[in-house]
Image (cartoon, helix red, strand yellow):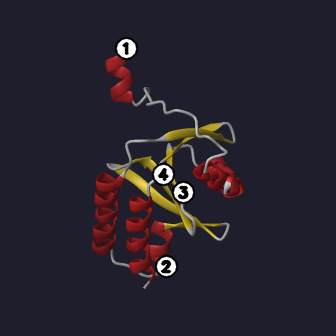
Amino acid sequence: MGLFDKILGGQKKEYPPLDLSSPTGQTVQQLKGALEMITKQINDPMEVVPGSDKTFVFVGKPPQQFGMLWIQGGAVHNFAKLAKEKNIPQVQFQLLSEKLREAYKKNAPQERFSTKVSNKTITIMPSDSLGMEVNRIIENLNG
């Protein structure tokens, strides 16, 4: 059964629970409202990179297939929607998506945690380097 679980995506890696009293845990607690809104709208797995200014959310199965959201000032932003609003050509959008993929591969931390938000378990990835690189990519898109 293990082989079929892996093929069908049924087996999910488990991470230790996030210590909510830690600095990362406190950041996640401050974002609880926005994270609850996201988890109620999205059924896909989520990996959250908490930050002081922006918190990034990889949705899906990074680095292969994923979407990108971020929380800033209590508002949730969508990478694909921003690219559409800025009239970014599909070819350039694919290049930016590839940059996000490479940033993830290069900077995703080995240490990850899990926490529950709206009865959904999400993965927390504390990584300043990943956050900074993703922020740089998004800021370039924002112009």
Q: Which residue is mark 4?
A: 126
Q: Nearer the viewer, mark 1 or mark 2?
A: 1
- Secondary structure of the residue carrying tag 3 is loop
Mark 4: amino acid: Pro
Q: Is residue 71 above or below residue 109?
A: below
Q: Which quadrant: the N terminus?
A: top left
Mark 2: amino acid: Glu
Q: Nearer the viewer, mark 4 or mark 2?
A: 4
Q: Nearer the viewer, mark 1 or mark 4?
A: 4
Quick one: label 2 or label 3, which is nearer the N terminus? Answer: 3
Q: Which residue is mark 1?
A: 1
Most foreground residue, 77 or 123:
123
Mark 1: amino acid: Met
User: In x, y percent, where is residue 13?
Assistant: 43, 31
- Who's the residue at 38% across and 28% down the image? 8
Please report contact status of discs 2 and 3: CB closer than 8 Å, yes or no: no
Q: Which residue is mark 2?
A: 85
- Who's the residue at 46% across and 60% down the image? 68
Residue furthest to the right in view is 33
Quick one: label 4 or label 2, which is nearer the N terminus? Answer: 2
Where residue 111 sits, quadrant-wise, is top left
Q: Residue 50, labelled with which disc? A: 3
Instruction: Give how far apart the Cα atoms at labels 1 and 3 are.
Output: 35 Å
